[in-house]
Amino acid sequence: MSTALLSGSIYREHLAGRVGHPERPERYDAVIRALEKSGLAQDLLPVKPREATEEELLLCHTPKYLRIARQDVDAGLPSLSTGDTDIGRNSWDVASHAVGGVLNAVDAVISGQARNAFCAVRPPGHHASAGRGMGFCLFNNVAIAARYAQRKHGLDRVMIVDWDVHHGNGTQDIFYPDPSAFFFSTHQWPLYPGTGRADETGEGRGTGTTMNFPFPAGSGRAEILGAVRNSLMPAAEKFRPDLLLISAGFDSRIGDLLGQFTLTDDDFEDLTRAVMEMAERYAAGRVVSLLEGGYNLSGLASAATRHVETLAGH
């Protein structure tokens, strides 16, 4: 089975023409051009975007928030009233197609059409909580993917691995009391959004299914890959996920504009292999990776290409 690639020109339309914003359309272009230049793109199973239904968005977001977000976009506001997410007239449409496309990728992997998948989507999602868009994010793509896999496909346990340089506070909030979803994050501390302390481990029945590793600026392979190998892999053996999702933020790469971690392309290859190894053991190899951050265009392109090459077994 091949690796699937979710892509579509609609993902470059969010914030088109907004000068100086780090989460810009050129991010999408950089990833797709690098995959094409590598020769890898032609070997990937194409997955198409689609609009998410309201029912799908409601898997993780409140009706009140969806009303507010749509009103903000329709009113032509420059940013969401709930937080620091710049928007344009088409941002609801683009973000909805990001969610829907990711769910198509989940379908492809769980049905066996593809072994795994990479979703080259914008806008990112991991800062969006049930009732608030923030941090460049409108909808929480990875959280909705996890819930969808459980509700539509009947999977019991989903593990989310977030190696973005920023903490995925929205994903954590959505699943904090939930024992069926395991959230693991490595992130720079202190850094936006200021969450993700090591003692944030879940609550109620979900205690123990949140695992945070806040590291100082300058951290890299030893800390992040070490956390995956020494803490996440033993946790996965106990949790035994049916699907692994990656919040693949490449702003943890050396030289990024918004972070000071020092991961290299080789490190992303090894992180990807570690997730694939866990998936082979417990989840029939099923991995769906979603683009989150990454703001140095050349670094984003090279790291994402190495990541997808590794998923594809190259």
Image: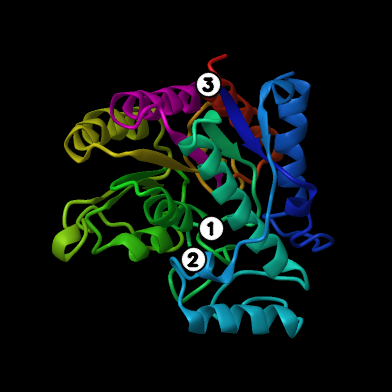
For label 3, the residue is 310
Q: Which residues are magenta?
A: 266-291
Residue type at mark 3: give it: Thr
Residue farthest along the right direction in this orientation? 17
Q: Secondary structure at mark 1?
A: loop
Work out whether mark 2 precedes mark 3 in sequence or the reverse, and give the earlier one.
Answer: 2
Residue type at mark 1: give it: Gly
Task: Give the percent coordinates (x, y) of residue 247.
Answer: 47, 45
Q: Count neighbours of disc 1 (C-alpha within 10 A) and say few if under 14, some if 14 to 19, many if 20 or more.
A: many
Distance of label 1 from label 3 (alpha carbons) = 23 Å
Q: Residue at x 79, y 48 (%)?
A: 9
For label 1, the residue is 125
Residue 93 location, quadrant: bottom right
Q: Main secondary structure of the magenta part?
A: helix
Distance of label 2 from label 3 (alpha carbons) = 28 Å
Based on the picture, tell me whether residue 165 belongs to the magenta stretch: no
Based on the picture, tell me whether residue 284 belongs to the magenta stretch: yes
**Vertical position of residue 26 compared to residue 51: above or below:** above
For label 2, the residue is 128
Q: Residue at x 38, y 30 (%)?
A: 275
Q: Count neighbours of disc 2 (C-alpha within 10 A) and say few if under 14, some if 14 to 19, many if 20 or more.
A: many
Q: Secondary structure at mark 3?
A: helix
Task: Give the percent coordinates (x, y) of residue 4.
Answer: 61, 32
**Vertical position of residue 183 compared to residue 16: above or below:** above
Task: Give the percent coordinates (x, y) of residue 194.
Answer: 38, 63
The C terminus: image quadrant: top right
Q: Residue at x 57, y 71 (%)?
A: 54
Left or right of residue 302, residue 221 in this image: left
Q: Count neighbours of disc 3 (C-alpha within 10 A) and say few if under 14, some if 14 to 19, many if 20 or more.
A: some
Residue type at mark 2: give it: Ala
Distance of label 2 from label 1 (alpha carbons) = 6 Å
